[in-house]
Amino acid sequence: MVRGAAKAASQERNAKKQAAMKKAGTQLGCGEKALSLDCSICKTRMPTLQNLKDHFASKHPTAPLPDGLEEGLRAQAEKRAQDQKLKDKKAPPQAAAKKKKKNNDADLSLLMEGLGTGKKKK
């Protein structure tokens, strides 16, 4: 059983933990925030523009797509392409990675020869 200052410190830590949990909310609330788009016909909620387009194609094939849906999808695709270009620009060259692998294989064969587990090729 904890007494004195240790008990007070423990209660203080527990109170902070409880306050943080209360402030964070529930995961159900986070899920509701993610569903940000509504189908104008059946009021079903969707998380992304692509999901909304697929929903319209399967559930309401004769209805026209909502205004701005195609433009939004194009903008998302352009942003993804720009992000990929930046990512590719920052990536190290592939040749350096291949050279490193070859050196590791040579080191491994030398190690095996030193241990007597590998045989030298004549």
Image (cartoon, rainbow, N blue to C red):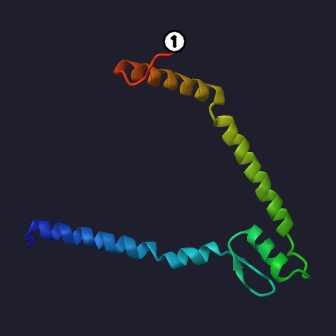
Percent x, y for residue 55? 78, 77
Look at 50% across and 75% down and name the residue there: 27
Percent x, y for residue 69? 83, 69
Q: Is residue 23 above or below residue 122?
A: below
The answer to whether residue 5 is left or right of residue 117 is left
Q: How many numbered tags mark residues here?
A: 1
Residue 65 location, quadrant: bottom right
Percent x, y for residue 99? 59, 23
Classify mark 1: residues with Cα within 10 Å, few (<14), some (14-19) or many (20+): few
Residue 26 visible at all: yes
Look at 21% across and 72% down and name the residue there: 11
Residue 45 location, quadrant: bottom right
Look at 56% across and 24% down and name the residue there: 102
- Which amino acid is tagged 1? Lys
The single residue placed furthest to the bottom in the displayed view is 42
The answer to whether residue 87 is left or right of residue 55 is left
Residue nearest the observer in this picture, 111 or 28: 111
Q: Is residue 76 above or below residue 52?
A: above
Element marked by disc 1 = loop
Residue nearest the observer in this picture, 77 or 105: 105
The answer to whether residue 76 is left or right of residue 112 is right
The single residue placed furthest to the top in the displayed view is 122
Look at 37% across and 18% down and name the residue there: 114
The quadrant the N terminus occupies is bottom left
Percent x, y for residue 44? 72, 83
The answer to whether residue 110 is left or right of residue 14 is right
Q: Is residue 74 above or below residue 20?
A: above
Residue nearest the observer in this picture, 19 or 57: 57
Residue located beneath label 1 in the image: 122
Residue 93 visible at all: no
